[in-house]
Amino acid sequence: MSRTGRVERTTKETSVVVEINLDGTGQVDVATGVGFFDHMLDQLGRHGLFDLTVKTDGDLHIDSHHTIEDTSLALGAAFRQALGDKKGIVRFADASVPLDESLAQVTVDLSGRPYLVHTEPEGMAPMIGAEYDTTMTRHILESFVAQAQIALHVHVPYGRNAHHIVECQFKALARALRYASEIDPRQPGIPSTKGAL
Ligand SMILES: [Mn+2]
């Protein structure tokens, strides 16, 4: 049974295509037009061992907001689709990933209910490169969570460099999503006393 998702999302602001294979090897082909965001999606696929294709054609003449937000919504929807009925999955996972002076701690429940808790150090640099507004990190996570329908807690208890602070979050997110979505050989059914997730 292949655990894959494919989502096409087109509005007057953006056109997005996302394909994901949860049981991949980290093959990533990403082009959103926003370099730093591509770098983050690359981390997500590589460290999640997801095969991930993302193509976004967005209204970058305005700014990168719609491009980043809509890509994140489509990615969340594709992830949800790939999980299918969630039979046999581990469901809960956490991962801590340092990047030099910064640390990210991510905990996830593939619960069927969207909820985000997110904290970052105060006083981050407002931009990474010319196109990535650092307040977008929370917006990416909110958008992903809304469509993936997961509970996601992301904390950066300390860090200084904005690039490091954001990148360690995507690496830890990748690892936590990988472990939570893996098949648990001891757990044949849907891991919920409700019988559904
Ligand atoms: Mn928005």
Image: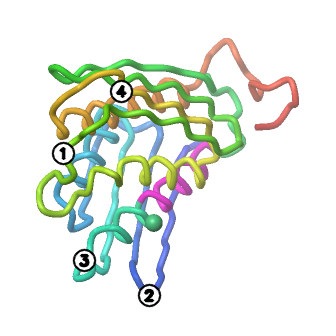
On whether residue 76 falls in the magenta region, the answer is: yes
Q: CA distance from mark 2 to mark 3?
A: 12 Å
Tell me, for residue 156, which label it has, or none.
4
Give amino acid for label 3.
Leu
Tell me, for residue 12, which label it has, or none.
2
Residue 121 sits in quarter: top left
Q: In the image, which is nearer the foreground, mark 4 or mark 1?
A: 1
* Quarter that holds the N terminus: top right
Give amino acid for label 1.
Ala
Q: Are marks 4 and 1 in contact (CB under 8 Å)?
A: no
On whether residue 175 falls in the magenta region, the answer is: no
Of pointers 1 and 3, the one earlier in the residue sequence: 3
- Residue 180 locus on image (x, y percent): 55, 26
- Residue 177 locus on image (x, y percent): 48, 32
Q: Is residue 161 above or below residue 136?
A: above
Q: Is residue 54 above or below residue 196?
A: below
At 25% across and 77% down in the image, what residue appears? 60
Counting other residues with Cα less than 10 Å from the Cα at mark 1, is it few (<14), some (14-19), or many (20 or more)?
Answer: few
Q: Is residue 30 above or below residue 49?
A: below
At 47% across and 83% down in the image, what residue appears? 11
* Quarter that holds the C terminus: top right
Residue extent of the magenta highlight: 72-83
Kindly identify which residue carries mark 1: 125
At 36% across and 45% down in the image, what residue appears? 51
Of pointers 1 and 2, the one earlier in the residue sequence: 2
